[in-house]
Image: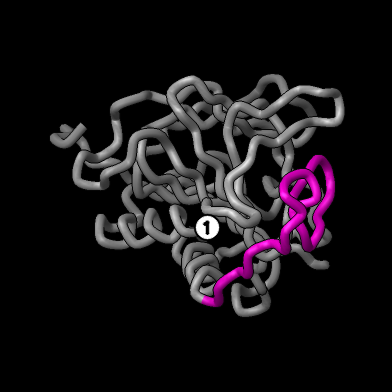
Amino acid sequence: MDAELFPRSRVEVSPGAVHVPDWLGMDRQRELLEACRDWARPPAGLRTVRTPGGGTMTARQVCLGWHWYPYAYARTAVDGDRAPVKPFPAWLDELGRRAVGEAFGAAAPGPSTSSYDYDIALINFYDGDARMGMHRDGDERADAPVVSLSLGDSCVFRFGNTDSRGKPYTDVELRSGDLFVFGGPSRFAYHGVPRVYPGTAPPQLGLSGRLNITLRVSGL
């Protein structure tokens, strides 16, 4: 993957959904990785998410700003150690705004990026066997674009439609450093991760597995 015949370029996967390859440089990726390691430590650290039906998500998660649990938000880790959720840093808000601006430019769906106040981060860790089923990010009270950043192993990111978990959908390979933003008509599209490719993380990053940092505006 280091020697591409054709460099990867920005792609609009569907209206309002944009993939920007290699958006994060290696230094920035390392900074985010170290921050994720700090956030993953207790209290209110990395946990296994349990669904109301008694199942468990194979990707483990830690939250910032607001704690997500199926299917609501709280200020404490209500399905974990019940500690107060870790604060959402201002620099992540700035990163989210910049991501939307660079993904969409002047054609950003909805309000201008200056009106977005990103205040939630969901950080999911995938080992080689982890998956994420098709779902919608629909527990927020705002329709601001969702910002997704990838670190570590590559994965198949399946981006679907707003009506059902089935077809039509598009499979996108997300690699370490990639940005994916979805808003406007694609804000509530179903999406998931059917496969992770173990051992594909950049060696210089020092991460085994995949981290996905998802930034959202709560509207709460």
Quarter of the image for residue 9 reads: top left
For image coordinates 47% across by 27% down, the residue present is 156
Q: How many residues crowd around disc 1 within 10 Å: few (fewer than 14), some, or many (20 or more)? A: some
Q: Is residue 31 magenta?
A: no
**For this rendering, which residue is in front, 191 or 39?**
39
Give the residue pinned by disc 1. Answer: 39
| Whether residue 217 is situated above or below residue 45 in the rendered picture | below
Seen from the viewer's position, the closer of residues 62 and 216 is: 62
Magenta stretch, main secondary structure, is loop
Would residue 146 be seen by someone viewing this image from the given angle? Answer: no
Taking depth in this image into account, of 105 and 53 the one nearest to the observer is 53
Instruction: Tell me where residue 89 appears, x and y as whole percent.
Output: 55, 73
Q: Which residues are magenta?
A: 68-90
Relative to 117, say whether 143 is above or below.
above
> Residue 65, image x and y in percent?
67, 65
Q: How many marks?
A: 1
Indicate the secondary structure of the residue bearing disc 1: helix
From this viewpoint, is residue 219 visible? yes
Residue 19 image point, x, y percent: 46, 46
Quadrant placement of the N terminus = top left
